[in-house]
Amino acid sequence: MATYSVDYLQRLMAAVEWFEAAFGRWMDTQEESDHFQSRGLYPTVWTKDGQGQAAVRMLELGVAEAAGAAARAGTVTGAGMGVAGIGVVDPIDNWSSVAAPRALFSPGTPVPWRPGSGAG
């Protein structure tokens, strides 16, 4: 088992909190469908009317940067989300999939974190 310093874990936690805040800001610009509407050709989220595409793109880039900083959290903690037919996935690594058709999970669906493979 790996041993991590307190400093490293504090920095990793700060990175996860940064990701959570950046993702929340991006989600404020998104319209979210319900689980049943998004199970096919439609994405789970799409840009709300009236949102500037350049501003939304900058928020997306901010989420991607924050996700990179927080990417080791799933591996360090062994946490992930179980997706039927797929296995355990890391929601930080897969955040952008919510805007794709047939998303693995949706941001508004409460799914408990559970120990997993820590894929990351």
Image: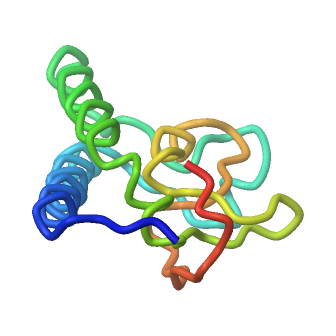
Image x and y of residue 45, in percent: 47, 46
Q: Quick check: 13 above or below 98?
A: below
Q: Nearer the viewer, residue 114 or 98?
A: 114
Q: Nearer the viewer, residue 70 or 7?
A: 7
State the residue at coordinates (65%, 48%): 103
Image x and y of residue 72, in percent: 40, 51
> Position of 67 compared to 25: left or right?
right
Instruction: Tell me where residue 46 sits by quadrant.
Output: top left
State the residue at coordinates (27%, 50%): 23
Q: Residue furthest top?
A: 54
Q: Quick check: 62 above or below 21?
A: above
Image x and y of residue 93, in percent: 49, 45
Q: Nearer the viewer, residue 84 or 13?
A: 13
Q: Quick check: 58 above or below 63?
A: above
The image shows a total of numbered marks equal to: 0
> Position of 37 compared to 113: left or right?
right
Q: Nearer the viewer, residue 7 or 113?
A: 7
State the residue at coordinates (89%, 63%): 85
